[in-house]
Image (cartoon, rainbow, N blue to C red):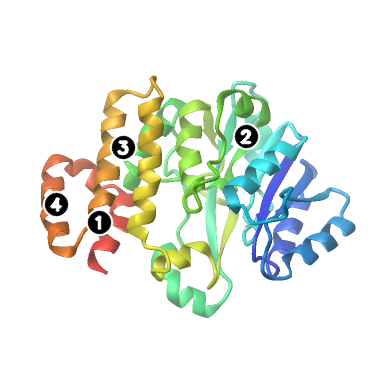
Amino acid sequence: MKVSVIIPVYNAEKFVSHAVESALQFEEVDEVILIEDQSPDNALQVCQQLAEKHERVKLYQHPDKRNHGASSSRNLGIEKATGDFIAFLDADDYYLPNRFDAEKELFKNPKVEGVYGALGVHYYSEKAKEQYYRIFRDKLTTVYKKHPPKDLFFGQLHMLGTFGLFSIDTLTLRREPLMKKMEVLFKSHLRLHEDTEFLFRLSYYLDLYPGSIDKAVAIRGVHEHNRITKVDTRVIDPAISRALLWNEIYQWAQAEDTVPEKAVTHIRRMHRSFEIAKAPRLKKWGMVAKYLVTDYRSIRSGLYNINFKRSLIS
């Protein structure tokens, strides 16, 4: 295996060295690609030092050296990658020593186009834990049971609460089918949930297999400046961001002729539910009652409960 690990870097001077070192521990990692995205801190200088210190670390910026967001940064990283396999890592997260154990065995089968695993959580400070433990707790972000690839897209779509989710930090992909089957990679106009939208489409087009799903292979680093914290503290309204996400998925499902109508209908209802969450409170509750009647099954999903209900009671 020759793995290219892509790390978008923004405002992460305190964390990116740990992320890079966690990737360099593996002989399977042929290169670590840092995409510095006009950070307001000293992240660029830290990245330059890492690239000078480690032969396998490669540093890039966008051609205009301006900020373009995580989606464009990951796309640039994929463009620059030379490995047969692509893996991702956020600059404030890190890999564990077992990160590629399952992958080394599973990718011996040429039919395996991607492998995903479980993500743990680490709180960088007591303040971060106090504020965000109710969101992440100490639970794994994972798909709870091993499923065949054909069930992954529909399982995430219809049974998020009981099916589970996987994170981009735990994903490893064959480069060739990724480039062949995904006409659009990460959507640059999305500044939040761009990885979630990508993973939905990816699980539809590629055959993704479970690796280590009951033991973490990577760690989400939680601190006061995560993008998720901006949503939670209402710098960004969660209902609006989720409505944009599901609208994007709905537009894709409508345009993709092979997506079953049943799935398109469900996606439309999820989009509608988050649109309702943006409405004034009285109208909100009336529409929620209607939605309970029309689509009770999907309102039980974990994604709906965690995000939609939170926006209602705020």
Up the image or down, 88 lies above or below 12; here it is above
> Which label lies toward us, 2 or 3?
3
Say whether disc 2 or disc 4 marks the residue closer to the N-terminus: 2
> Which label lies toward us, 3 or 1?
1
Up the image or down, 280 lies above or below 212; here it is below
Q: Return the residue at label 2.
A: 173
Which quadrant of the rendered structure holds the C terminus? bottom left
Q: Residue at x 62, y 34 (%)?
A: 173
Q: Return the residue at label 1.
A: 277
Query: SS class of the residue under badge 4?
Result: helix
Q: Return the residue at label 4.
A: 287
Q: Return the residue at label 3.
A: 267
Q: CA distance from mark 2 to mark 4?
A: 41 Å
Q: CA distance from mark 1 to mark 2?
A: 35 Å
Query: SS class of the residue under badge 1?
Result: loop
Say whether disc 2 or disc 3 marks the residue closer to the N-terminus: 2
User: The residue under label 2 is which amino acid type?
Assistant: Leu
Q: Residue furthest bottom?
A: 127
Q: Is residue 250 visible?
A: yes
Query: SS class of the residue under badge 2?
Result: strand
Which quadrant of the rendered structure holds the N terminus? top right
